[in-house]
Image: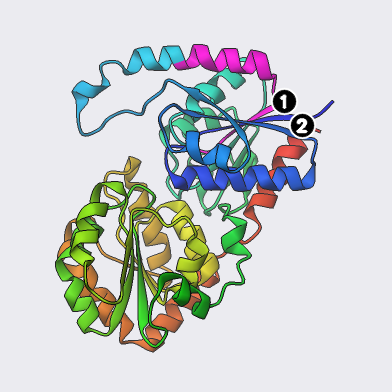
Amino acid sequence: MSRKVIIAGGGTGGHIFPAIAIANALRKKDESVAILFVGAKGKMEMEKVPQAGYEIQGLDIAGFNRSSLIKNIGLPFKIIKSLWQARKIMRTFQPQIVVGVGGYASFPMLKTAQQQKIPVLIQEQNSYAGKTNMIIGKKAARVCVAYDGMEKFFPSNKLVLTGNPVRSVISRSGITRQEGMVFFSLDPSKKTVLVIGGSLGARSINEAIDLHLEKLLDAGLQVIWQTGKPFANRAKERAEGLAGVWVNDFISQMEYAYAAADLVISRAGAIAIAELCVMKKPVLFVPFPFAAEDHQTVNAMSLVRKNAALMVKDQEAREKAVPMIIDLAAQEAIQKTLAANIGNLAITDADERIADEILKLIQ
């Protein structure tokens, strides 16, 4: 009888791509493993997971809206409906384990699994644990973490330090800087700044680039600018006719972007950090200030304290991010130090470590 695994969660690329990496690692270790993804209807995972070759089912669930409390009126009904849907999925698929990777859809599946005495494994990406994971983690069979000191959130006997999974196309990429330059039609003699605000974009980072684009170009730099959908049209108009600027809402082949990049401006999501560690890039973090428990600032500060990154607050990014990156571009010694220190924090086989923990629990 084949072993059955549900992987629940999503919402952003930072949850989806690690989940796919874990699924791929499971398949590599045991081809007979049956894997079902469960996500939130209307979210990115409903498109990205099938593209990766896996089946996915959607729940009618949304997160708590911090910016507009009135939009939360229907939330209790959605939670009840999603728990009912989760029970139906569990009954039909009958998994031996449920893996939670974060995002709206993880809670109904993990809660239902625990009620049915089915083992739960949580993959906590951040240095500050999310509330759902803290609640579920008390009775989880295993909690895979990426940072030290997580005993303050979870029972220490459940913890395994695995790191965060990085897509194999990035972690095992052999693409050269020259190939990256050709891919983005850029000048190999110039330093390249990669600007990434996560899969959904980042307003403060986009506004900073919009405001100071000529300053970057006048400093002899060129730009790969991932904007996210909301800012894409404005950014494309802004870059019209300017040499040395590549703009799009999403970069589907990030391995080329990392290969081309000499410096990076990025949000401080856990998976972005994991990728930047593996790729050894000097980075200026602009943490998203409204992330739960401000975990992106906590993530970024854990690197800043190790002299492995620079950071600017979101509310100061519009004025300070571009001058800081221009300043960094002129200082080779600091770039080398940041690149070496961030590289020392890389874990390249996190997907396999997590897959091993899953298989141990369902032997």
Residue drawn at point x = 37 percent, y = 52 percent = 198
In the structure shown, which secondary structural element does the residue marked by tag 2 occupy?
Answer: loop
Q: Using the rendered image of the protein, determine whether residue 203 is visible from the camera's viewpoint.
A: no
The amino acid type of the residue labelled 1 equals Gln
**Alpha carbon distance from label 1 to label 2:** 6 Å
Q: Residue at x 49, y 37 (%)?
A: 47
123 w.r.t. 348: above or below: above
Looking at the magenta stretch, what is its main secondary structure?
helix
Pick whichever, 156 or 226, lies toward us: 226
User: Are dots 1 and 2 in contact, CB under 8 Å?
Assistant: yes
Magenta region, residue range: 82-101
Kindly identify which residue carries mark 2. Answer: 362
Residue 159: horizontal and vertical position, in percent? 61, 43
Say what amino acid the circle numbered 2 marks: Ile
Is residue 133 positioned above or below 194 on the image? above
Residue 242 showing in the rendered view:
yes
Find residue 96 and name its label. Answer: 1
> Which tag, 1 or 2, sits closer to the chain's start?
1
Residue 95 falls inside the magenta stretch: yes
Indicate whether 105 appears above or below 260.
above
Quadrant in which residue 310 is drawn: bottom left
Quadrant of the snapshot with the N terminus: top right
| Residue 297 is inside the magenta segment | no
Q: Secondary structure at mark 1?
A: loop
> Hey, which quadrant is residue 138 in on the image?
top right
Q: Quadrant of the C terminus?
A: top right
Q: Position of residue 34 (x, y in %)?
A: 73, 31
